[in-house]
Image: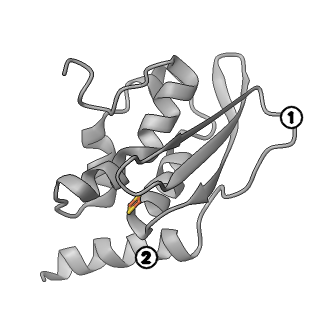
Amino acid sequence: MSEWDELFRENILDHYRNPRNRGVLEHPDLTYEDANPLCGDRIRMDFKISDGRIEEVRFSGHGCSISQASASMLCEEIEGKPLDEVKKLSREDVLEMLGIELGPVRLKCALLALKTLKAGVYGLPQWPGEEDA
Ligand code: FES
């Protein structure tokens, strides 16, 4: 493993062990929960939205280190951002945040949070990147 991979792996573990934005919001404007059918792991996201901006976001649920780290990274990334900007986030952006090579099974783990976000906020239920499939 290269030093670079090592760094990304440590970052993933850090987000897994010390998740940012973990929890629930008391009166969310929007809540959505989704699961990875391969393992049953779930992520729920609560949003406070005002003036076309994600004011607050929290995630809860359970899953493997990749799914939880990617939820934590994604929440950190989108909090405070305009919805228009958030809408442009792609699977490539999430994979870039994680920064390690993933096989097809782990790919679903990595994209569960983005799927939850997109389905919750935009009603796009497909797995990101599989919209045309
Ligand atoms: Fe379930 Fe990764 S093993 S989301």
Residue 13, which numbered label? 2
Quadrant (top left, top right, bottom left, bottom right) of the N terminus = bottom left
Would residue 8 appear left or right of 125 to someone viewing this image? left
- Whether residues under marks 1 and 2 lie with C-beta atoms below 8 angstroms apart, the answer is no
Would residue 47 appear left or right of 26 to someone viewing this image? left
Toward the right, the furthest residue is 26
Task: Name the residue rendered at 19%, 60% in the picture.
Answer: 102
73 in relation to 2, above or below: above
Residue 27, which numbered label? 1
- The quadrant of the picture showing ligand 1 is bottom left
Residue 100, which numbered label? none
Q: Amino acid at mark 2?
A: Leu
Q: Position of residue 76 (x, y in %)?
A: 55, 50
Q: Amino acid at mark 1?
A: His
Task: Name the residue rendered at 52%, 40% in the picture.
Answer: 34
Q: Is residue 53 visible?
A: yes
**Mark 1 or mark 2, which has the lower sequence index?**
2
Toward the left, the furthest residue is 2
SS at badge 1: loop
5 in relation to 94, above or below: below
Q: Quadrant of residue 49?
A: top right
Pick the residue in front: 126 or 80: 126
Task: Name the residue rendered at 40%, 72% in the picture.
Answer: 11
